[in-house]
Amino acid sequence: MDLSVLIPLLNESESIIELNESIISSLKDKGLHFEIIYIDDGSTDNSWSIITNLSKLEFISGFRFQKNYGKSMALSAGFKKAKGKIVVTLDGDLQDDPNEIYPLYKMITDEKLDLISGWKKKRYDSIIFKNIPSKLFNLAARKASGINLNDFNCGIKAYKSEVIKNISLTDGMHRYIPVLAKNAGFFKISEKEVKHHPRKHGKTKYGADRFIKGFLDLVTLSFIQRFGKRPMHFFGLIGTVMILTGFIISIYIGYDKLFINKSGRLITQRPLFYISLVTMLMGLIFFIAGFLGELILRSKPNTDNYSIVEKTN
């Protein structure tokens, strides 16, 4: 299999047939052995019945989630099903151009790249609610990750199969697949300017809160990138420093009472005593948090965070 095209979607019944025809038209004369996989993320319209009908063709398949689990879980499931040497993802709302699929495929193969992210330089979205927040989000992602991309969250991307088989997506982390790929050891990451079309049908499935969630996910990812494998290195270090600080303060006030100000206030009447006590207790809490994090990390089973209720082919 040369190419797998993955399309996560939610309530896009008005777009699926046109999208499917455009994908086939863009690839039919390219001499590629390809497949199209639709991931229905819990649609409540007739998206699944359309996908089922399209799947009568051998190279088209799909599966449907029990409920809406989000784009990250849809992509994660699609990555596991994909058989192509190159995998291209695009959204199901017709805003991503299927004519970009083959150029992305050629860039991956010709330039020996690991991942190519689309860049919607000219967008047909709300300037206030999407364009400006998107620019701020991408700026923060560039600074935090060190990856020089203009559009981390673009739906159309291309990957070598080795990349998608070696990364693990959790909820909301589809925005940071380039970062996850880099952390997994895939450094040949590039970008291609792609066409962006106005939405033809329906309305966007994402609210303004996605950018707030995106920034919070970025903080989480930055932490995991540094301490995800060894949480004790973060919590234990802070805890140890706080315990030592509190212990040193307690030694000072004890020495002061025994040898310097013998007739002064009782130790329990001095604010430093309580500062020392609270600091040591907080340090102990941090240390325990790191220890528990290590235990959880080593005992957590690898399970899928989604449930597939139907599939085709």
Image (cartoon, rainbow, N blue to C red):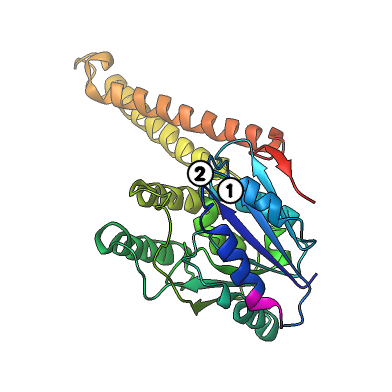
Quadrant housing residue 171: top right
In the picture of the structure, the residue carrying the numbered disc 1 is 47
**What span is colored magenta in the figure?**
25-29
Q: Amino acid at mark 1?
A: Ser
> Residue most toward the left?
264
Provide the secondary structure element on which disc 1 rests: helix
Provide the secondary structure element on which disc 2 rests: helix
The mark tally for this picture is 2
Residue 86 at what x, y percent from top left?
71, 71
Gap between marks 2 and 1 measured at Cα: 46 Å
Q: Amino acid at mark 2?
A: Phe
Residue 144 at what x, y percent from top left?
43, 61
Q: Kindly identify which numbered label has been placed on residue 91.
A: none
Question: 197 or 16: which is nearer to us?
Answer: 16
Q: Kindly identify which numbered label has been placed on residue 234.
A: 2
Whether residue 17 can be seen here: yes
Residue 292 at what x, y percent from top left?
59, 30
Most common secondary structure along the magenta stretch: helix
- Contact, CB < 8 Å: mark 2 with mark 1? no
Question: 287 or 184: which is nearer to us?
Answer: 184
Specify whether 225 is left or right of 39. Answer: left
Residue located at (52% from left, 77% from top): 191
